[in-house]
Image: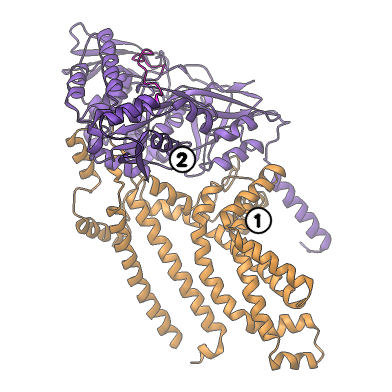
Chain colours: A orange, B purple
Amino acid sequence: MTLLRTVLLRLITTLITLLGVAVIVFVVIRVVPGNPIAMMLPPGATEADILRLETQYGFDKSIPQQFVIWLGGVMQGDFGMSISTRQPVSTLVLSRLPATLELSIVALLIAVIAGGTMALLGTRFRDTKTEGLVDVTAGMALSIPDFLWGLVLILLFGVLWPIFHISGRISPSLDIDFTTNFYLFEAILRLRFDVIADLIGHMFMPAVALAIPLAAIIAQLLKQSLKETMNLDYVTLARTKGYGEGKVITSEALPNAILPTLTLVGVQFTFLIGGTVIIERLFSYEGLGNMAIDAVINRDLPLIQGIVILFALLFTLINLAVDMLYVVLNPRLRHA
Amino acid sequence: MKLNRRSLLKLSAATAAMTTVGLPSFAQDIDELVIAYNVNLPSWDPTVGLSAVNPTIQGFYQSVFDLYIPQNPDLSFGSGIITDYGWNDDGTGIWMDVRDGVTWHNGDPLTAEDVAWSLARVANPDTGSPIQFIWGKITNIAADGNRVTADMPEYEPTFFKWMSFLTGYVMPKKYYEEVGAEGFEAAPIGSGPYMVEKFERNAFVRLKANDNYWGGAPAFKTVTIKFVTDAASRVAEVESGNSHVTLEVPYEEFDRLKAKDGLAGKAEPISDIGMIFLNDIEVMTDPNVRMAAAHAIDKGTIIDRLLSGYGVPIDTLQTPDYPAYDASIKVPYDPDKAKELLAASGYGPDNPVKFKIQTTKGYKPKDFEMIQAIVGLWRRVGIEAEIEVYEIAKHFELRAADQLAPAAFYNWGNSVGDPTTSTGFAMFGPSPHSVWDGEDTFNAILPLWGERDEAKRIAGWKEVDRRIAENAEVIPLLQYVQPILHDARIDVVPHRSGALLPHLMTRA
């Protein structure tokens, strides 16, 4: 019952948050310099031409009027038409969302596996050179931003040892007749190994670039948490029962130590999705982030609004999911 | 399937092998041409909306659609869908002859009806056509046999040049009316050298050769154009062999890259220029300040040092390829003269004249660095300019509202080369692209818009350019050179418009 009430409360606050984001974004992108009509003015445009274009795109109305019209459309699932692509915004963002989600999830998996492994190694071999190596590696990984890791990876695996694709999400020559845009997930379900290999060949470098900083954070936090847990009485008890150090860490210490890391991973996952904007651009990956940059360059106001709202929705839903997971995993909260 | 260590190893090896499948190698023959392009293609209709007036994506459109009148790589006008054209005797109407035997990509014949419908469509403001000020000048468009005629109550000397420029594409009447705007975006057809096979927004377009193309079938049967907006990634694409051709390679990298085994490069001037708009406000109303600012810039050194020599200094808004180019108009680098001019207005290194200069950063190669260098040169003669970096969208808005700073860097494209589309629109006060309001220039330009005598018209524009240069009403800087990096097995023919056109590429 408590869980249900919490979920409902969070959903209500999510709606309020989204409305707030919508208002702020709507106003800000109209107030900052850079008018889309000015961008499409031909050389000999007259005042009448400018007025005609403003009327055509609805910019002749006041900002509150424009917002009410836009919100009315959103209530009916119509996010407007993109100025630059002349396609419905909802179609555009929903067609690109799967690519960004797949990339983010794969990056998260890589980060969790790499960061978790580093933390376990650092804990297992604490106070040795291995722990020092883990700390140095994590420090290095954190001190370089993801887009620079992207450039390093391009140089290594794109140019010097060209085994991965540098740009795109899938090879143009590949014929796929999938029903969704979740190419990777659908390819796995359909056992299309050629498509899986091609997708991974494209996704590997951007996913690793995104994962490296997060892996470092996970490694540092989880290792610290594990080290604290390793000194607790129940862990000592497990040792006295004759459990090996590896089993003590994975079976006894890890379940308790992982909770703070889980919260952090949830929060960091939203940052990771935010990081896709630059990484997708660098690798010409056809996701939401890449589209967002084009939308900003072209001052495609309806498309910017759609993308920001979708990102905001994603962030709030992920935070909600993490909170719920935390409640489920933590008995003290579950029974509170 | 039972998974054991051996089968897992086999699967891993197979996956690794599949991952590398499709990565081109310099040792193989090129069956499919792959181009890493520097911009995305937002929309397929080349005649309406924001994309229609975007010069950077015209190469995509010219691969799939035909311009009414094509331009050759040297910017001269060729014979295309319109084979012959002209005005009637009194200049109140036009006629155009349409090529026989041309077909659309779906096999339908291209007729004079298509040409008439295309013109009528862009002349109609309700379609969202942005070039109303040209197409709106014709009325009573009619097709008879293979001839299209129209009335032109107001004489427009550049009308036929616009048939090679933005929105000047022939569209398929029957097909468009059948599928509508959305259907056309989803499955565009044209009459150009390539047909659209697959299009993934923000990713790539895959083109298939139009073997029935009236101008001859292209050399490459399949072309993939990847949209790779990051310059480092584009370079990596070609270095790794993933792509065969790319453009807008950083100048400082270009010489190193083209010298590598298996790679080659071409760098030729294009119709884009770099310039500094001067807004006749504040200190820019003082001709001494403007002329001093112009004479204090060492364009040659800036091009050599910042652009590795890839650029052509210019002193008017015409490049040497344009009909109104006049080599005798010079604004030389002369810092002593600049100091004298400033002194005459009471300024000098100890009492500098101050104003703001706006620039983009990274929109064009070395734009910000060039302005930094210019500000440094200005400081030596007694000009203290404060740099403001802005986005290109803000530039457009400020320019349309005549609110640019006293100086503002911009790049101007004019692939048809007519003086109206360079000096005309940049310097004629009422134009939304001009921030110069001086009455003398307005009066000098005004009669040239409708001048019927072509020789007189061009001579008139040369005179306008001369007086603009003498009064330093704008500071032209350079004609850009476009570096194209490509696989040595391919021969690339650069087009002066800057469009990278796959049908001009052949096997070397």
Describe residue A162's horizontal placement relative to residue B125 as left or right: right
Describe residue B54's horizontal placement relative to residue B222 as left or right: left
Across and down, in percent, residue B305 comes to: 53, 31
Q: Which residue is mark 1?
A: A191
Q: Quadrant of the N terminus of chain B?
A: bottom right
Q: Is B210 in front, or is B447?
A: B447
Residue B76 in magenta stretch: no
Q: Nearer the viewer, mark 1 or mark 2?
A: 2
Q: Which mark is residue B149?
A: none
Q: Give the vertical position of B56 relative to B134 (above or below).
A: below
Mark 1 is on which residue type? Leu
Across and down, in percent, residue B347 comes to: 29, 35
Tell me the crowding category of disc 2: few under 14, some 14 to 19, or many 20 or more residues within 10 angstroms, Cα based: many
SS type, badge 2:
loop
Report the magenta residues as a range: B320-334
Callout 1: residue from which chain?
A: A
Mark 2 is on which residue type? Asn
Q: Is B325 in front, or is B473?
A: B473
Across and down, in percent, residue A215 comes to: 63, 66
Q: Quadrant of the C terminus of chain B?
A: top right
Callout 2: residue from which chain?
A: B
Is the C-beta separation of discs 1 and 2 under 8 Å?
Answer: no
Describe residue B178's horizontal placement relative to residue B155 as left or right: right
Q: Which residue is mark 2?
A: B40
User: Image point 66% across, 66% down: which residue?
Assistant: A138
User: Image point 43% across, 70% down: which residue?
Assistant: A316
